């Protein structure tokens, strides 16, 4: 497999001089003013992009039960977003720089980016960069829409059979987002409180696992009336993940413990009652 070729042609495509400079992916939803005179050299499919303007009401979160990759929630590296932009098929692409993750990467591999399982479509080991595709649905359901050039992201490669299991089972299927409501220092540790939807909060329990931006963490308390939960980051963890870099009001990706989903499924299916009888 020829992987030594440079990303230069791809970079030139993304850095199209006719395309306005973007501060975040979300600006693709609302093009900046005075762009109607620009001549674009690529063809965006409006129907696909228009999906981003449609809000779908889901009273209950839909969990994906298909497990293609598995992660531990132990962040391997903090990568830097080098480019975000539109792709010719109506989706989006993101190019990320990493110091360590490309040692044994292959096309089609899964990498968790802030807790979102994404597929490597291109990479360059010499530049230390890889490219992933982003669908409109991914942007709707995750905090990746807030990313911009220069943003730092948590990165983790998919689990191997020989890998030590240091965190908990994380699928990379983001269940929803939460909003950071407070950040408080206690010594060299950091308390973080996150607010989320009741549909997700019911799966979050004190002393239980949760993946926040792909980081395996232990829940300390759940505040049902406030629809919040909190956790603490020790000094070492603060230096290795992106959560401390985020401000109050910013979003984080959340994936609840898969065991809670399975228990709910068994109870709702009548399996337990059948066993008792």
Image (cartoon, rainbow, N blue to C red):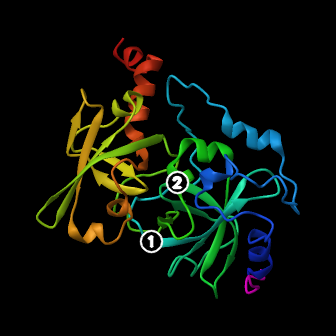
Horizontal arrangement in the rendering, residue 131 relative to residue 146 (left or right): right
- Residue shown at the point (75%, 69%) measured from the top left: 14
Compared with residue 258, is residue 2 higher up or lower down, i.e. above or below?
Answer: below
Looking at this view, is 198 or 85 the one in front? 85
Alpha carbons under labels 1 and 2: distance apart: 16 Å
- Residue occupying the point 40% across, 59% down: 73
Q: Residue furthest top?
A: 277
Q: Is 13 left, or right, of 25 in this rendering?
A: right
Image point 44% across, 52% down: which residue? 170
| Magenta-drawn stretch contains 5 | yes
Q: Main secondary structure of the magenta part?
A: loop
Of tags 1 and 2, which is closer to the observer?
2
Q: Quadrant of the C terminus?
A: top left
Q: Secondary structure at mark 1?
A: strand
Q: What secondary structure is found at the residue carrying circle 2?
A: helix
Which region is colored magenta? Answer: 1-6
Residue 272's quadrant in the figure?
A: top left
Numbered tag placed on residue 78 in the rendering: 1
Quadrant in the picture for the N terminus: bottom right
Residue 77, percent across and down?
44, 73
Report whether residue 109 is seen: yes
| Residue picked out by circle 2 | 146
Q: Position of residue 212 (x, y in %)?
A: 38, 52
């Amino acid at each position: 497999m020829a992987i030594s070729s440079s990303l230069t042609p791809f970079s030139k495509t993304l850095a199209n001089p006719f395309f306005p400079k973007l501060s975040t992916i979300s600006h693709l939803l609302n093009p900046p003013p005075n762009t109607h005179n620009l001549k674009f050299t690529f063809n965006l499919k409006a129907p696909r992009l228009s999906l981003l303007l449609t809000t779908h009401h889901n009273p209950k979160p839909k969990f994906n039960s298909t497990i293609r990759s598995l992660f531990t929630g132990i962040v391997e590296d903090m990568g830097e977003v080098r480019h975000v932009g539109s792709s010719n098929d109506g989706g989006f692409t993101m190019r990320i720089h990493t110091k360590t993750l490309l040692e044994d990467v292959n096309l089609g591999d899964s990498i968790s980016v802030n807790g979102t399982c994404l597929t490597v479509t291109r990479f360059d080991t010499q530049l230390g960069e890889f490219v992933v595709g982003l669908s409109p649905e991914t942007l709707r359901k995750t905090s990746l829409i807030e990313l911009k050039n220069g943003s730092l992201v948590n990165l983790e490669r998919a689990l191997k059979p020989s890998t030590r299991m240091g965190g908990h089972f994380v699928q990379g299927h983001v269940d929803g987002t939460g909003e950071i409501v407070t950040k408080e220092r206690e010594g060299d540790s950091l308390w973080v409180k996150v607010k989320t939807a009741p549909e997700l909060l019911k799966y979050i329990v004190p002393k239980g696992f949760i993946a926040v931006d792909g980081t395996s963490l232990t829940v300390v308390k759940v505040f049902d009336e406030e629809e919040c939960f909190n956790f603490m980051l020790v000094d070492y963890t603060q230096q290795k993940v992106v959560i401390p870099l985020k401000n109050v009001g910013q979003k984080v990706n959340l994936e609840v413990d898969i065991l809670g989903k399975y228990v709910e499924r068994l109870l709702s299916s009548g399996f337990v009652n059948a066993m008792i009888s």
